Image (tube, rainbow, N blue to C red):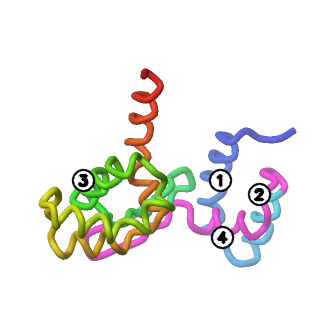
Amino acid sequence: MRLTVKEKHKATRITAARYQKASKKKKGAILDEFIELTGYDRCYASYLLKNHGRKIWINNKLRAIGDIRKKHKRQRQRIYGDDVLKPLKLIWAIMDCICGKRLRPMLKEMLTILHKHKELRVTKEIKKKILRISASTIDRLLKPERGRNTSLKEGL
């Protein structure tokens, strides 16, 4: 009979304490028991038992404690923020809400035309970001707007 996920976590917590204190010869026997109990692959099982509860120093002040239940999501710094999104929304609306693949080649021309007619003022830095943006990123940024826009069109 298979164990539930909660039971596997509990077994890992209990076995990890024994495993980390054991000698090299005993670790093999403990690992064999654990593999038979949980059905995990040997490499993964040894990784879990070795790192569960281990303290990891990230820098001088920050310390993390290894727990198999906690996942760490990496955070990236946003490249295209609201300063790029506002002019992009304007251009997208002017172009009748076309997809990012079709909008991307038109951005340079639209920026110059809108700047010439004093419809849009952007700094050089923002202009560089807009010209560097990819079609898929455009679609990702405009996804919330697309949902709002389709609901408006359906009401007409």
Instruction: Assign a secondary structure to mark 4.
Output: loop
Between 107 and 12, the one nearer to me in the picture? 107
Left or right? Give the position of 33 relative to 100. Answer: right
Disc marking residue 86: 3
Q: Is residue 30 left or right of residue 71?
A: right
Provide the residue span drawn in magenta. Answer: 36-63
Q: Which residue is mark 1?
A: 12
Distance between the alpha carbons at the discs numbered 4 and 2 = 14 Å
Nearer-N-terminus badge (4/2)? 4
How many other residues sit within 10 Å of disc 4, few (<14), some (14-19) or many (≥20)? few
**Amino acid type assigned to the residue bearing label 3 in the image:** Lys
Do the residues bearing badges 2 and 1 touch, measured as CB atoms within 8 Å?
yes
Q: Residue at x 45, y 33 (%)?
A: 150
Residue 38: image location, x then y, percent: 78, 51
SS at circle 1: helix
Give me the disc on residue 34.
2
CB contact under 8 Å: marks 3 and 2: no
Q: Quadrant of the N terminus?
A: top right
Q: CA distance from mark 4 to mark 1?
A: 15 Å
User: Which sits earlier in the primary sequence, circle 3 or circle 2?
Assistant: 2
Residue labelled with disc 4: 22
Q: Compute the Cα span from label 3 to label 2.
A: 55 Å
- Distance from disc 3 to disc 1, alpha carbons, whole Å, reads 50 Å
x and y, in percent, of residue 18 in the image: 64, 61
Q: Amino acid at mark 4?
A: Ala
